[in-house]
């Protein structure tokens, strides 16, 4: 197994996407349009984005799929982005993960995930592919696989000397033992509030320092708050930095957060300073929301560079 500088551990899903005028109310049937199957899954989206955006770093995905045609399709999408899928393992007990996604005209979405094989990724699996983490500069995680697996993988990545980056999505409370293994925690507003047990609310840049301080107290060395249109805020060993969001017409926000995390990790792995890495990540995420779908919306390196050049 060849070593990669950036390792993503997490979910692979086939996304079933339908466009709707508005979200259905409970008990209601509505008509949507333009059904599409698009490769997704928070882990696979991060790996795909890292593969498309990386110039100097190799990317590897660790995860589980079923024995079905979706698995082949998802692995092919990652391989086409230059990702090493040799540590994506197949399991017979469960089908490949799927996500049902409704996208409104405003670009807002609702997502239900049936984890399937993602739920079978175990701490023993991580141990069986632990050499995949050797030499990694960055390791990326999310929460669509079992928490004990995420914690085991964080530990292996830490021991291998990688900077660990956790996207705490889907939002949930997390044990101290897991958060202690996180170098960079990257919540959006609702994820941050849930982690802290606060009422959900909009957070602007002026409130970001208070929120970041409360999150640091949970264990992570650095925090990046993803504040939507307001941009993002970093607090950590490199000091404090923020970057404004880019104004674009939203078509679909699916995978914007995944693209942000991967782009930030790529930029950091290539030696960019935090402020530049945040701007690069904001640009990649902004481009992704102008297109429908998860992996279908993730830009290439040259698209991000052109986007940034046009905004100097
Ligand atoms: O973050 C977006 C992703 O969440 C989708 O691709 C879907 O599969 C769910 O995992």
Image: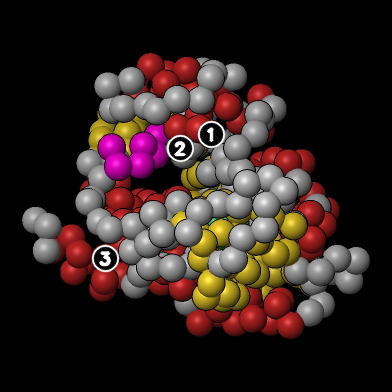
Query: Percent x, y for residue 91?
Result: 84, 69
Residue lying at the far left in this picture: please name it: 312
Which residue is pictured at 67% across the width and 74% down the height?
A: 86
Q: Let me know if residue 76 appears in the view.
A: yes
Question: Is disc 3 placed on a helix, strand or loop?
Answer: helix
Query: Percent x, y for residue 197?
Result: 59, 19
Q: Quadrant of residue 118?
A: bottom right
Q: Is residue 52 above or below residue 257?
A: below
Left or right of 103 in this view: 69: right
Question: Is disc 1 placed on a helix, strand or loop?
Answer: helix
**Mark 1 lies on residue:** 191
**Mark 3 lies on residue:** 304
Q: Quadrant of ligand 1?
A: bottom right
Q: Which one is in front in this view, the residue at disc 1 or the one at disc 3? A: 1
Q: Quadrant of residue 195?
A: top right
Which residue is pictured at 52% across the width and 75% down the height?
A: 34
The image quadrant where one finds the C terminus is: bottom left
Which mark is drawn over residue 188?
2
Residue numbers of the magenta segment: 225-230
Q: Marks 3 and 2, how far apart in space?
A: 22 Å
Q: Quadrant of residue 256?
A: bottom left
Please name whichever residue, 19 or 142, is drawn nearer the observer in this view of the structure.
19
* Disc 3 and disc 2 in contact, CB within 8 angstroms: no
Badge 3: residue crowd in 10 Å (few <14, some 14–19, many ≥20): many
Badge 1: residue crowd in 10 Å (few <14, some 14–19, many ≥20): many
* Disc 1 and disc 2 in contact, CB within 8 angstroms: yes
Q: Marks 1 and 2, how far apart in space?
A: 5 Å
The image quadrant where one finds the N terminus is: bottom right
Q: Which one is in front in this view, the residue at disc 3 or the one at disc 2? A: 2
Please name whichever residue, 122 or 245, is drawn nearer the observer in this view of the structure.
245
């Amino acid at each position: 197994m060849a070593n990669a500088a950036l390792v993503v551990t997490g979910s692979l899903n086939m996304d079933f996407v339908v466009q709707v005028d508005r979200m259905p109310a409970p008990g209601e049937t509505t008509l949507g349009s333009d059904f599409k199957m698009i490769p997704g899954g928070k882990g696979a989206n991060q790996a795909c984005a890292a593969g498309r955006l990386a110039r100097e770093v190799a990317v590897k995905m660790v995860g589980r799929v079923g024995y079905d045609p979706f698995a082949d399709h998802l692995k092919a999408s990652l391989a086409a982005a230059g990702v090493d899928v040799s540590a994506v393992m197949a399991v017979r007990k469960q089908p490949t993960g799927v996500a049902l996604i409704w996208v409104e005209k405003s670009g807002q979405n609702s997502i239900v995930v049936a984890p399937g094989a993602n739920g079978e990724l175990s701490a023993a699996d991580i141990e069986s592919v632990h050499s995949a983490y050797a030499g990694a500069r960055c390791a990326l995680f999310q929460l669509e696989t079992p928490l004990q697996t995420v914690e085991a993988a964080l530990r292996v990545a830490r021991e291998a000397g990688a900077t660990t980056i956790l996207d705490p999505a889907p939002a949930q409370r997390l044990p101290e033992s897991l958060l202690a293994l996180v170098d960079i925690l990257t919540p959006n507003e609702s994820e941050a509030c849930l982690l802290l047990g606060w009422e959900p609310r909009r957070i602007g840049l002026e409130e970001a320092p208070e929120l970041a301080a409360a999150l640091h107290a949970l264990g992570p060395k650095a925090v990046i708050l993803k504040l939507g249109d307001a941009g993002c805020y970093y607090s950590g060993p490199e000091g404090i930095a923020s970057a404004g969001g880019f104004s674009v017409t939203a078509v679909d926000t699916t995978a914007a957060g995944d693209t942000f995390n991967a782009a930030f990790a790529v930029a950091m792995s290539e030696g960019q300073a935090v402020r530049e890495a945040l701007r690069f990540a904001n640009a990649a995420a902004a481009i992704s929301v102008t297109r429908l779908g998860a992996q279908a919306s993730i830009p290439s390196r040259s698209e991000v560079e052109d986007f940034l050049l046009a905004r100097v």
